[in-house]
Image (cartoon, rainbow, N blue to C red):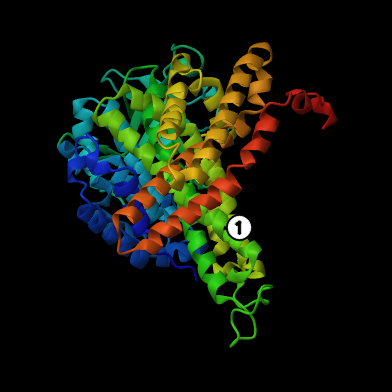
Amino acid sequence: MPTYTAPNADFDFVLHNVLNIQEQDIPGYEDLTQDFTSAVLEEAGKLARDVFQPINASGDQQGCVLENGVITTPDGFKEAFDAYREGGWNTLDVDTDYGGQGLGYVLASCVGEIFSSANMALTMYPGLTHGAISAIHAHGTDQQKQTFLPKMVDLAWSGTMNLTEPHCGTDLGLMRTKAEPQDDGSYKISGQKIFISAGDNDMTENVVHLVLAKIPGGPEGVKGISLFIVPKFLVNDDGSLGARNGVAVGNIEEKMGIHGNATCVMNYDEATGYLLGDAHKGMRAMFTMMNEARLGVAMQGVSQAEAAYQNALAYAKDRLQGRDVTGVKNPEGPADPLIVHPDIRRMLMNQKSFVEGARAFALWGAVMIDRAHKNEDAAADGLVSLLTPVLKGFLTDVGFDMTVQAQQIFGGHGYIEEWGMSQFTRDARIAMIYEGANGVQALDLVGRKMPKDGGKHVMAFFDMVKTFLTENKDNAALADFVGPLKEASKDLQAVLMHFMQAGMKNPNDALAGSTDALHMFGHVCLGLMWAKMAKAAQEALDAGTDNPEFYNTKITTGRYYMARWLPTNKTHMARAMSSSDVVMDLPAEAF
């Protein structure tokens, strides 16, 4: 059966050597000392290892059950959820006015990766609740905040987001769910939503649904969408639970993975709802939750790749298979371990270099979110908005690929459920689809985020890369990093310039290359992270350390990324700059 150990040494390195969080002028970061974050992550790792991970496979096998309108989660989930709740893990970065600790999204992101690696399906319940908390905190009235947030922060109540309908997913303008105004200021919500993760459960007293719906007479399309708070149980004036609302689970979806999470069809039959934010401005309110969710999903891609890698590495060191062509490495045994073989090393190095670079990228994004929110920094907000589709799309695309490579190392055993490797692949697969499919993320990057504010934010990103390259051009220790990063950055800029020119004549030329552009962007971001990590590691070695092996390993792993991953940008560049004619010329009826 798979195992999992939190990579706390790597978290410590990224937080304090690379991102230097204590040197940031972000409120709350002054409390994030190395001793404090290490202690927090150690405790998270223990709970993840001892409580979450042991029920990951059984939860996958058992799944959720709907009987007589009641959801039952897998054995052990409620006890694990209670342990998570009692530990206050949901409160780390939440406003102190509502029971949170106000410690910053960056620390919560570390903890989120740890628990997701151990049990992604279970971690989604508090994860979605956290997103709903953020939306109510940003857009709710004082009364709504006082009514819902303390119980949700405490995880006595959970939360969801309801967007998709049977006939519309990405194109929410086709939505049919209606919200009829009532004399008391509430609304009656009627309609059906599908694919609702954590739609119901037996672990919390109430479920607070955030539901997109249209108020009759409003504008057409997405401009007429509003957001509503629709609790499973109505809440009395004194905060106690009242009557059951007109919302029910119609079905649990049969899925490829995340079986321990109840993905529900939700039926709303004149359910009482309360407008969250302004009428017809629901997309703005929902995107408060969606952007956070997309960063959380990006971390899911990392988390499943990390867990799969740990188990593939252990297997490669233990499994005896063949002999090293350069000489026997295990003379006392009948064969050498798998890890001696170059192709096995290639797959392990792919996984290791991706996971560590991706973790640094995701935590850098978390710092930008903290800066944008806590410092009201418009530049940080613009940069993280630009990079959100890259984080979500790239880290989940490649994270899934890495779980496949981890499975491959097991050979036939990787295909057998007994070994548990397929669960990482099946669970990781959804991250490429939900919270905006990755093709849509690529379109968002190319069509909206890069041109936003006249290209101000994408130019700020390239200026950041250029500044790093200029400052380190004479640093001999970084020669293997600066050169490849400079070339990859130039290639990405060339593609973006091509899109601007070609897209004016034929928009399909940009759109057909958008996924390649997103992956190029992702590789440049990870290249920048690896260059920064290599610099930090070399500085630690130069200063003297009692753990030189860790820092030398970091530099060697980074060199692999620059030499073996970044060159793939040349292929992406060639595809992105080719004419869209080869994509679009074949008539639909000829397929």
581 and 179: which one is in front?
581
Task: Tell me residue 530's x, y (percent).
Answer: 46, 45
Q: Position of residue 274 (x, y in %)?
A: 31, 26
Residue lying farthest to the bottom in this orientation: 332
Q: Quadrant of residue 103?
A: top left
Instruction: Give the amino acid type for the residue marked by disc 1 in the picture.
Output: Gln
> Which residue is at the front of the view, 84 or 297?
297
Q: In the rendered view, does 401 fall on the left or right side of 548?
A: right
Q: Is residue 586 left or right of residue 92?
A: right
Question: In this image, 235 relative to 9: left or right?
Answer: left
Percent coordinates x, y for residue 208 in the rendering: 33, 39
Give percent across and percent down for residue 467: 41, 30
Q: Residue at x 45, y 68 (%)?
A: 3
- Residue at the far right: name it: 590
Circle 1 SS class: helix
Q: Residues within 10 Å of mark 1 (few under 14, many from 20)?
A: many
At a point 64% along the width and 64% down the height, the residue shown is 342
Residue under the point 34% across and 65% down: 51
> Can you tell which quarter of the image residue 542 is in?
bottom left
**As drawn, 78 above or below 155:** below
In this view of the protein, which residue sits in the foreground, 544 or 40?
544
> Image height check: is 511 above or below 110?
above
Count every numbered label the image shows and give the total: 1
* Vertical placement of residue 542 versus 504, above or below: below
Can you see residue 52? no
In-front residue for pair 306/550? 550
Q: Residue at the spot x=56%, y=29% of the render? A: 490
**Quarter of the picture holding the C terminus:** top right
Disc 1: which residue: 405
